[in-house]
Image (cartoon, rainbow, N blue to C red):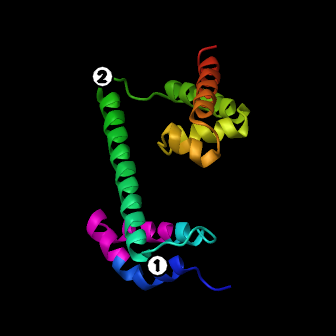
Amino acid sequence: MPESPLVQAFRENERDLVQFLVARLKSAFAAQDIAQELYLKVASLDGHEPVRNGRAYLFRMAANLAIDHQRRENRQVELLAEAQAWLADGQEPATPERTLIARAELRRLERALAELPPTTRRIFHLSRFEEKSQREIAAIVGLSPTAVFKHLRNALDHLAKVRDP
């Protein structure tokens, strides 16, 4: 099966795309990962409308993926700083008892997540772990933003009931 024009454009511009990503991300490893993600996205676009300027389209996609990557990285740094501040904020060191209690609560929440319908569980994951907006989630799962909101509310209500019996 012949390659799509966009996949061909990717192959022709791959070196330039990786250099562009290295300059943006300051990491050759991250640039390679993003370039691979870009290739997978481009390869999955077979059958879509043709793109007039494949090179420009690829660089725009690469820039968007780099921005998403940087946002995830920044969020992880924020969460780590938050966790460290919380841990250092006069908290007692973990004891075996506290560890057991925390593990039991974690298992209870994992079971509660498993009880959710698959669509609700996926929406919750996209929202809380992949930091997608309700609009982005709606596009991914094929529902309206209102339906996504309702799924999220149901998931949070269910988890709250399990956490606070």
Q: Element type at marker 1?
A: helix
In the foreground, 142 or 160 = 142
Q: Depth check: 40 or 78 in front?
A: 40
Indicate left or right for 65 with 105 as reference.
left
**Where does the image place residue 128, in percent across and percent down from the top left?**
51, 38
Q: Is residue 158 above or below residue 27?
A: above
Q: Quadrant of the N terminus?
A: bottom right
Tell me if 154 is positioned left or right of 15 in this view.
right
- The C terminus lies in quadrant: top right
- Please name the amino acid that badge 1 sits on: Phe
Depicted 43 relative to depicted 65: above or below: below
Residue 45: image quadrant is bottom right
Taking the magenta stretch, the answer to whether it contains residue 141 is no
Q: Which residue is mark 2?
A: 90
What is the x, y in percent for residue 53?
Answer: 42, 75
> Which secondary structure is most common in the magenta stretch?
helix
Q: Residue at x 35, y 30 (%)?
A: 87
Q: How many marks?
A: 2
Front residue of 149 and 107:
149
